[in-house]
Amino acid sequence: MRKAILSGMVILFLCGMVGAQDRIEAPVWNVGDKWVFTRNFIMEVTGTDENTYTLKFSPGGVFIHDKSTLNRLYYVEDDRRKIFKGHRKRGLNFPLFLGKIWEDKFSSRPAGSTIATPENYYLETSKVVGWEDIKVEAGNFRALKIEYNHLSYLS
């Protein structure tokens, strides 16, 4: 079982919100908003409509996210939307509040495998566990701490 704390990601989305608010709604993004992470990972808003954001991840591809939850709905391949069924489909799952728990199951085959290769099955669980004061290069922030667990299992 692998655990990761996503408080760094939460900072990006909540940096303007401080205090122990009961419910945190998804942030509003605009075309051109861009985040540059360590190790040359870039996320940029390249499109928006009434209900979705189009995000380009470099490296990683293009994904369409729901505006109200920031959940991944689709990925774009050959200029066509395809339903997203992979990991971290609901990475943050707004609105956020203390104690909120969500989980997702998905399956995948190893890269380069054939249809005869058995699928691997996974369970992801996330929980909002509390507020934390953190210090990063951009400054000091009060952020929600989310515990994320990713484990594989047999079907």
Image (tube, rainbow, N blue to C red):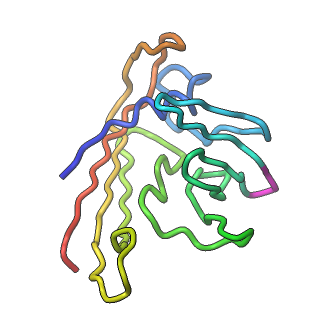
Q: Nearer the viewer, residue 138 or 50?
A: 138
Look at the image and say whether residue 83 sits in the magenta stretch: no
Position of residue 111 measured from the top left corner of the image (x, y, whole percent): 38, 68
- On the rendered structure, is 141 left or right of 49? left
Q: Residue at x 79, y 41 (%)?
A: 31
Position of residue 34 measured from the top left corner of the image (x, y, whole percent): 68, 33
Q: Nearer the viewer, residue 115 or 47?
A: 115
Q: Is residue 82 above or below residue 23?
A: below
* The residue stretch that appears in magenta: 47-51
- On the rendered structure, is 22 left or right of 70? left
Q: Residue at x 35, y 74 (%)?
A: 109
- On the rendered structure, is 73 left or right of 147? right
Q: Residue furthest front?
A: 112
Position of residue 37 measured from the top left corner of the image (x, y, whole percent): 52, 30
Q: Nearer the viewer, residue 146 or 139?
A: 139
**Res. 112 image quadrant:** bottom left
Q: Residue at x 45, y 15 (%)?
A: 136
Secondary structure mostly seen in the magenta stretch: loop
**Res. 121 image quadrant:** bottom left
Q: Nearer the viewer, residue 67 or 77?
A: 77
